[in-house]
Amino acid sequence: MATSEGSTPEERSGAGRTNGLLVGGAVVTAAGLLALLFVDPILGAFLLIMGVTLMGLSYLARDWDQHSTYEDREMARALKRKQKWERGSAARERDRVRWEAHQARQARKTEQ
């Protein structure tokens, strides 16, 4: 589904569709209540169940596309990796000093 550049943020995010589902579910639920009381209990129960289901789905779908983008998640991961790398800098420095001392000992052994 293509969106035009002149569309409102609600149209781009699907909020209008979710609100429409909520209103539709409320209408079907009201019709189900009326049918339950005045027409047929089975038809009324069916409409009532469908209306409540529609309203529940529209409630659950209200923030369906309000999630972070791939780039946002990757930036957060990169920041966490950078912080973890910086926390380990002291250990890496100790290891580097130990390695250089080991290399110096090995060089002295080969000279003898």
Image (spheres, rainbow, N blue to C red):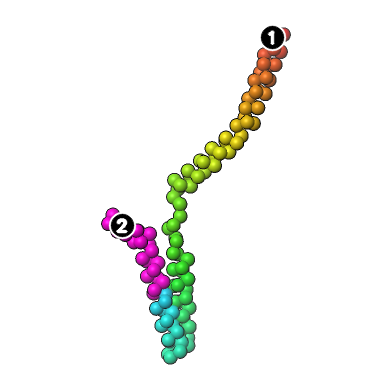
Q: Position of residue 78 (x, y in %)?
A: 51, 41
Q: Earlier in the sequence, mark 1 or mark 2?
A: 2
The disc label shown at residue 18, or none = none
- Corner quadrant of residue 90: top right
Mark 2 highlights which residue?
Answer: 3
Give the residue type that dot 1 points to: Glu
Closest to the observer, 31 or 50: 31
Mark 1 highlights which residue?
Answer: 111
Highlighted range, magenta: 1-24
Q: Position of residue 62 (x, y in %)?
A: 44, 64
User: For the residues marked 1 and 2, what is the alpha-carbon distance in whole angstroms?
Assistant: 75 Å
* Residue appearing at x 45%, y 64% in the figure: 61
Say few, some or many: other residues with alpha carbon within 10 Å of mark 2 (under 14 / 14 to 19 / 20 or more).
few
- Corner quadrant of residue 84: top right
Tell me the chief SS of the magenta region. Answer: helix
Give the residue type that dot 2 points to: Thr
Q: Taking 60 as reference, is 8 left or right?
A: left
